[in-house]
Amino acid sequence: MKIKGENSKLHRVNPNAILCDVAMLAKLKDGDTVDIPEKAAEELLKMGVAKKADNKTKKKKESK
Amino acid sequence: MADTRVQPISSIKYGLKAETSFGVGLDSAGNDGTAYLTQPVVQAQKPTFNILRESRLLSGRGSVKNAADTVVNPRGGTVTMPFEMLATPRTLAQHCLLVGQENDQTGSIVHEMEIDGSSNKTSIGGTITSGIPHSCNLAYYPASGEGIKVAGVIVSDLNISGDIAANNGLMTISGNYFSGFSNPVSTSTVLEQTFDGSWAARESTYFNILDADTRTLDVDDASNQTFIMKSFNFNIANNVTRVGFDTNGNAEAYAFPEYMITGDITIKWDDEFDYGAANNVIQDFLDGDTLSLAIKIGDGTVDSEGECNIAAEIQYTGDPGQDISESGVFHTLAFECVQNSSAEAFKISTFKNEAVTAW
């Protein structure tokens, strides 16, 4: 699931207690959008430290 | 041969779970499979049974007490237990509810507890609806078959404190649990209990007062002056007493005759809080002024874990003291909270995306 980090709030999250890896958490802390496992995403959403990002996948235009 | 068993203090845990019926065990059939909420304390203190025991030297016994003359009565007593922990979103909200017996939930989910002289319960003991009023089963668990379950547990006094020099600024809560169920019976407070449920894990998010974006206090002729804070304390007491007794001599209800909130805050002596005209903290004490105090940990929105807003209406209870250090002179302002027209004496808002029914 794609989520976008709330960079003013994520510093309170204990990195050892979250189900996503440190690199992803670092990106979230920068306010980036990352695609992480659903369970970890839902946990961060529940904590109010991330927001749902656009999860639509762009369709590639078919070449004629 | 003597037994070699050692009981490390860290192997003892305790948990809370909200009751659905006042003073009744949640699972009283054999082992207790309740999913207790593990509390993040460093050392779990043992519940203390405060019952009547009187050993008497009766007439005609000579010069030493006789074994047969001691009176013990577990009926009509109380059980108390101290606690101290770093505040986490759930523990802060639940302990505020346990001492204030008031909760308002909004959005997803802000828990607000206010003390205003009318919202808080003056007694509990009747029906519990959706976790309100709030009492818990407390499970103290050193080992299988040695657990103590205390029913009808609330918090009699709660201290909420923050100090930039202690715990790296993390807010702590401490206080005492109280129960009027001192007589062990199988369906309520019980000894020798095994707890074999899946206890909920502790949280790992805390409140750091170094995150407090908003720190304001009225002073003399000015409103909402921003202060530089060293520490704060709020002490909330509900003066709980047990009322009546059931067939086992346990409490029929609890009364909360008066909610009292006292505290202190240590803030820097500067141009916003000094002894001069308009910003005089001493004048506030001499005039008996009621002042609005606000501490907002986070950006004030209270929409994520670790954020919390505290608002209080305070009156200084003594002449402002001085806290002198290399950082300069700070004012130590002792206060009590009072209802001020429509402004609550004390209000705390915290975020935890769980309804109280989950506790």
Image (cartoon, rainbow, N blue to C red):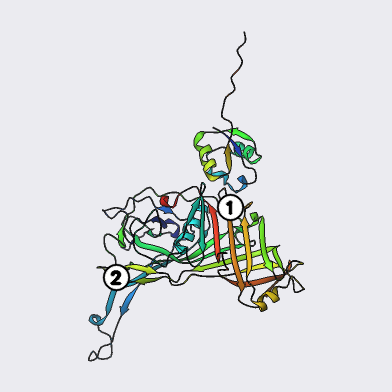
Q: Which of the chains bears the disc numbered 1?
A: B
Q: Taking the image as drawn, is residue B227 in sight?
A: no
**Which picture quadrant has residue B81?**
bottom left
Q: Is residue A13 visible?
A: yes
Identify the residue at image location x=29%, y=85%: B56
Identify the residue position indicated by label 2 in the image.
Answer: B245
Residue B129 location, quadrant:
bottom left
Q: Is residue A50 above or below residue B54?
A: above
Q: Position of residue B342 (x, y in %)?
A: 56, 64
The residue positioned farthest toward the top in the image shown = A64
In the rendered image, residue A47, in percent from the top left (x then y), is placed at: 54, 45
Q: CA distance from mark 2 to mark 1?
A: 41 Å
Badge 2 and badge 1 both on one subunit: yes
| Vertical order, B76 against B99 (above or below) | below
Q: Using the image, name the chain to which the residue with label 2 belongs.
A: B
Give the side of residue B200 with respect to residue B270, left or right: left
Return the residue nearer the eye: B61 or B346.
Answer: B346
Q: Quadrant of the N terminus of chain A?
A: top right
Q: Disc 1 marks which amino acid?
A: Glu
Where does label 1 land, which residue? Answer: B307
B318 or B207, which lies in front?
A: B318
